[in-house]
Amino acid sequence: MKIVIVILILVVALIALLLIIAFFIKKEYVIKREIVINKSEEEVYNYVRFLRNQENYSKWVMADPGMKKEFKGTDGNTGFVYAWDSENKNVGKGEQEIIRLVEGERVDAEIRFIKPFEGIATTSMLIEPASEGQTRVVWSMSGKNNYPMNLMIPFIDNLLGKDLQMSLGNLKNMLEK
């Protein structure tokens, strides 16, 4: 019986410690990854501005080819919404909306997650010259995790950063074919 009480006290102490630590961790996160693609800025921008093209390079979209998809508006234009719904817990349910386009330079989108957790993130794809015939693409994601979920923020860069880098590699391979 004493062992059960000691284990229970340790579990409660660990939970309390994590909650105290979460109180001091920032709530906002920003993740950035970049890659250089051997194509012109115009070619790269004209590809990434269309959210449907993410089916060819985004690790998250490619994770469940059978997910339900719904599209609202005109792809490649502000206000276009790409909604998804998947039974795959790593994909979940949500929607992505183009919220800002700067011709030849950037595509900003808001991602609204519904399942397996609710949340909002903003992504940006910046298109900039690297050198003659090469374009640098900087993909960033930012958001906020409220207390106590902000405990995950120290791990987000590593977890989501790998996915962003893999997706950028897929984008490079797709465009350089």
Image (cartoon, rainbow, N blue to C red):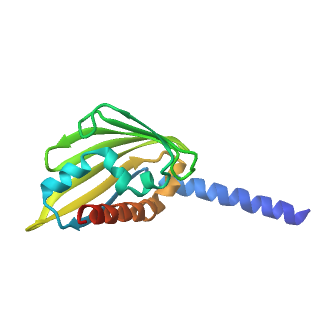
Please name the residue shown 15% across and 50% down the image. Answer: 105
Position of 56 relative to 118 (above/below): below
Q: Nearer the viewer, residue 97 or 39?
A: 39
- Name the residue furthest right: 1
Position of 58 relative to 3 (above/below): above
Residue 68 placed where, x, y %? 49, 40
Name the quarter where the N terminus is drawn.
Answer: bottom right
Please name the residue shown 25% across and 59% down the image. Answer: 138
Report which quarter residue 172 is drawn in. bottom left
- Name the residue furthest front: 177
Name the quarter where the C terminus is drawn.
Answer: bottom left
Please name the residue shown 23% across and 66% down the image. Answer: 176
Residue 55 placed where, x, y %? 38, 51
Residue 44 placed where, x, y %? 19, 56
Please name the residue shown 35% across and 65% down the image. Answer: 165
Instruction: Let me know if residue 30 appears in the view.
Output: no
Residue 93 placed where, x, y %? 50, 41
Q: Describe residue 21's horizontal placement relative to residue 33 as left or right.
A: right
The image shows a total of numbered marks equal to: 0
Q: Describe residue 19's horizontal placement relative to residue 78 as left or right.
A: right
Q: Describe residue 7's horizontal placement relative to residue 42 as left or right.
A: right
Q: Nearer the viewer, residue 151 or 156?
A: 156
Instruction: Let me know if residue 131 appears in the view.
Output: yes
